[in-house]
Amino acid sequence: SEIREYYHSLFEYARKPDHIREQLREGRMFPDVSQMINIKEISDKKRMLIADEMGVGKSASAILAKEYLGLNKALIAAPSNVIETWKSYLSDGPEGYFKNGLAPKFLEVENLESLKKSEIENFDYVLISHEKLNGRYAKELENMEFDMLVVDELHKLKNLKGGVRSNNLMQLAQKLEG
C-alpha cells in the first residue's frame, strides 16, 4: 500500500551521517520515526512547521534535517531562554546529538560585534535570540549565506504582521527562498 511504501522509504531515503549519535537514551533509536518523517518532509517540501508536543524532538528534527540533507549553514532563531538548550543539542555532550569529537561548530550571537567580527563561513550553525532580531542584527544577517532557517518558539514573536523582529525574520526567510 501507499502508506507502507512511505514508511519503508523513510529508512531507505538517506544514509545516516556518521557524526550523529546512534541513540539518545537506552532503547530509543535516534532519529526516531517521527524525526525521520520530519526530515523527509523538510527535504520534499523545503519548509515545514513542526508543532508537536514538548519533548517529542522538534529541535532534533531540524538539526537532523540539516545534517541528513548535507546543508552547509543553518541560522537558528530562538528565545534567549532556550539558546543554552540548543547549544547542548549541538554538542557531543550528554544531551548532544553528535558523537564524541564530531560536534559541529556554532556561533552564538552575543552582541553585534561578535556577528560582525566572526568568520561566518567557519560555522555550521549560527544561534541568535529572538530579542536580537532588530534592524542592526538583521542587516548583518542579510549579508550572510544560510541554507536553512530554524525558528524555535515562533509564537513568542507575537506581532507577526507589524512587529520589527517578525518582519526582519520574514525578510531573512524570503532571502533564503531566493
Image (cartoon, rainbow, N blue to C red):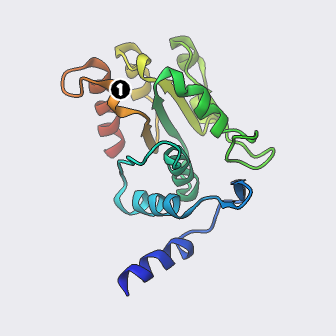
Identity of the amino acid at label 1? Lys
Residue neighbourhood size for the residue with mark 1, other residues' Cα within 10 Å, grouped as few (<14), some (14–19), many (≥20): few
Q: Residue furthest bottom?
A: 1
* Up-down relation of residue 4 to residue 34 (above or below): below
Question: Residue visible at 50% across and 13% down?
Answer: 112
Residue 5 coordinates in the image, percent (x, y): 43, 82
Q: Quadrant of residue 170?
A: top left
Which secondary structure, mark 1?
helix
Image location (x, y in percent) of residue 69:
53, 58
What number of labels is visible?
1
Classify 118 as above or below 104.
above
- Residue 48 picture location, percent across and down: 36, 51
Q: Quadrant of the N terminus?
A: bottom left
The residue that disc 1 covers is 156
| Camera-nearest residue between 147 and 44 | 44
Which residue is at the front of the view, 116 or 167?
Answer: 167
**Placement of the C terminus among the 4 image quadrants:** top left
Q: Is residue 71 left or right of residue 139?
A: right
Q: Is residue 45 left or right of residue 161?
A: right
Residue 32 % position (x, y) = 57, 61
Height in image: 122 above or below 114? below
Residue 78 appears left or right of 177: right
83 up-or-down from 95: above or below: above
